[in-house]
């Protein structure tokens, strides 16, 4: 099994390389052009204090994939809901990397106080659907023909899971550092 840890600034080039591979080679990522490392670094800087970014690596330190989270919507009533995503390097598909990343990501998000996790999947994608459903997520929406890439229209499905079904008012969301007892901005 891979080692899962919080992503550091020094991990951004590897994260962005995998993201750019997905942009160039798949419809899983709806950007149309590869993005510079600086854009990914800015996104990490803007979000990682409250939304965990994780990487998976082998015992030898080989980068295997990443998972990250971010706000579902910007309005305050949505602040307990999070969008999650995971990308696994093609050399490490079907080896438990995605599941390991999501397992740890879900644990941290729950400890922070988030309630609902949502993940978008460009359809069809049986492997991603299987991963999300193995994590206990279920399909909650399907948006037809919302993205156009590689000359075709694509549907996107959303899978979701409630980390807590309590009816009482939720508390304030903790930072990643508080939930993890560490400094996620270390480099």
Image: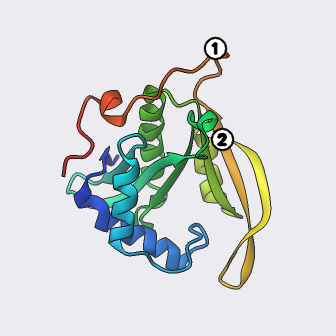
Residue 160: x and y, percent? 66, 41
At 36% from the left and 55% from the top, the residue drawn is 44
Foreground mark, 2 or 1?
1
On screen, residue 31 above or below 180 = below
Q: Residue furthest top?
A: 168
Residue 116: x and y, percent? 61, 34
Mark 2 element type: strand
Q: In which quarter of the image is residue 156?
A: bottom right
Q: Are marks 2 and 1 in contact (CB under 8 Å)?
A: no
Q: Can residue 136 be seen in this view?
A: no
Q: Which of marks 2 and 1 is nearer the N terminus?
A: 2
What's the image's color scheme?
A: rainbow
Q: Which residue lies furthest to the right in this view?
A: 144
Q: Which residue lies furthest to the front in this view?
A: 75
Residue 57: x and y, percent? 29, 54
* Disc 1: CA contacts within 10 A as few (<14), some (14-19) or many (>=20): few
**Residue wearing tag 1:** 168
Q: Quadrant of residue 170?
A: top right
**Residue wearing tag 2:** 160
At 64% from the left and 54% from the top, the residue drawn is 120
Q: Residue 78 carries which label?
A: none
Q: Can residue 48 be seen in this view?
A: yes
Is 155 placed left or right of 65 in the picture? right
């Amino acid at each position: 099994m891979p080692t899962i840890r919080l992503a550091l600034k020094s991990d951004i080039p590897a994260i962005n390389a995998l993201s750019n591979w997905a942009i160039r080679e798949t419809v899983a990522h709806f950007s149309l052009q590869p993005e510079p490392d600086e854009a990914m670094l800015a996104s990490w800087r803007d979000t990682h204090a409250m939304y965990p970014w994780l990487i998976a690596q082998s015992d030898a330190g080989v980068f295997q994939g990443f998972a990250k989270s971010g706000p579902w919507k910007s309005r305050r009533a949505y602040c307990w809901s999070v969008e999650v995503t995971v990308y696994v390097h093609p050399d490490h598909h079907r080896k438990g990397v995605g599941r390991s990343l999501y397992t740890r990501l879900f644990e941290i998000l729950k400890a922070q106080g988030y309630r609902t996790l949502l993940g978008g999947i460009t359809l069809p994608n049986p492997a991603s659907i299987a991963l999300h459903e193995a994590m206990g997520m279920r399909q909650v929406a399907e948006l037809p023909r919302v993205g156009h890439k590689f000359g075709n229209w694509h549907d996107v499905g959303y899978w979701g899971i409630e980390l807590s079904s309590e009816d009482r008012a939720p508390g304030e969301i903790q930072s990643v550092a508080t939930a993890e007892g560490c400094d996620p901005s270390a480099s």
